[in-house]
Structures are given as structure tokens and as C-alpha cells.
């Protein structure tokens, strides 16, 4: 009987502590409110990095296609994919340099690729 009474008192004490809060009740909410902006910022940076990497890969592929087109004597602007295109001659090589802004102008991407000139 004494064991049951002690268990009942403990349960009442715990229930009373939960109702009063004892300063712990809002701690999780406060920690979440403090950490949420940092988590959102980290996710935004990760998504931006993935988007910039994808844009760089696309620019590299376009530069390669533009350099091969210039080497064949075709119009390399068709392969520029809307980026600023510059063609350079270096001996027997024809190089295409593409540049484009990414992430709303926060980043300048550049890709360069060379191909053998003369259509060979």
C-alpha cells in the first residue's frame, strides 16, 4: 500500500511540474526558433551550389560543342546556349570561351574548350 501511495505522489508531482512548466516547457520552441534560420540558410546555400554546378557543367558542354563547330568552320554561336562567346586561335587550335552569370548575377561562370582547326 505504501508503494502505491508513493507512486501516486510521484505521478502527481510530475503532472504538477508539467503544468507549471518549471522553465523547461518553451525551451524546445526557443531552440527551434533560433536554429531554423541557420538551417534554412544552409539549405539555400546547398541548393545554390548545386544549381551553379549544373550551370557550369552545361557551360562546359556548350563550350566544347562551340569549339568543335568553330574547328569545322560552322557557326559556333549556335552552340553558345545564350552565353557570351569569344573565339580564339592558338596555332592549329580553335578555342571557344563562354561566360555567363549565375545565381542572379552573384557568380560569373566561365568555360573554355579547344578543338583542332581546319575541320580535321
Image (cartoon, grey):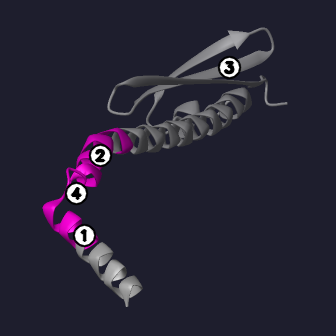
Quarter-wise, where is residue 47 in the image?
top left
Would you name the residue on which mark 2 appears? 31
Q: Earlier in the sequence, mark 2 or mark 1?
A: 1
Quarter-wise, where is residue 63 in the image?
top right
Span highlighted in magenta in the image: 13-39
Q: Is the magenta stretch mostly helix, strand or loop?
A: helix
- The residue that appears at 36% across and 80% down in the rendered structure is 7
Would you name the residue on which mark 3 appears? 95
Q: Which of marks 3 and 1 is nearer the N terminus?
A: 1
Would you name the residue on which mark 1 appears? 13
Q: Is mark 2 on a helix, strand or loop?
A: helix
Residue 51 colored in magenta in the image: no
Q: Which of marks 3 and 4 is nearer the N terminus?
A: 4
Quarter-wise, where is residue 40 in the image?
top left
The number of numbered badges drawn on the structure is 4
Q: Which mark is residue 25?
A: 4
State whether residue 8 is above or below residue 22.
below
State whether residue 20 is above or below residue 74.
below
Cβ atoms at labels 3 and 1 below 8 Å apart: no
Mark 3 or 4: the one toward you: 4
Q: Is mark 1 on a helix, strand or loop?
A: helix
Which of the pair 57/63 is nearer the observer? 57
Mark 2 or 4: the one toward you: 4
Q: Earlier in the sequence, mark 2 or mark 4?
A: 4
Amino acid at each position: 500500500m505504501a508503494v502505491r501511495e508513493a507512486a501516486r505522489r510521484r505521478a502527481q508531482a510530475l503532472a504538477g511540474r508539467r503544468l507549471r512548466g518549471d522553465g523547461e516547457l518553451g525551451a524546445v520552441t526557443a531552440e527551434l526558433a533560433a536554429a531554423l534560420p541557420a538551417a534554412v540558410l544552409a539549405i539555400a546555400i546547398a541548393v545554390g551550389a548545386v544549381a551553379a554546378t549544373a550551370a557550369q557543367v552545361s557551360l562546359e558542354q556548350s563550350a566544347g560543342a562551340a569549339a568543335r563547330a568553330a574547328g569545322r568552320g560552322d557557326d559556333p554561336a549556335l552552340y553558345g546556349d545564350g552565353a557570351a562567346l569569344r573565339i580564339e586561335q592558338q596555332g592549329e587550335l580553335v578555342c571557344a570561351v563562354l561566360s555567363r552569370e549565375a545565381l542572379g548575377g552573384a557568380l560569373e561562370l566561365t568555360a573554355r574548350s579547344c578543338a583542332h582547326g581546319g575541320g580535321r
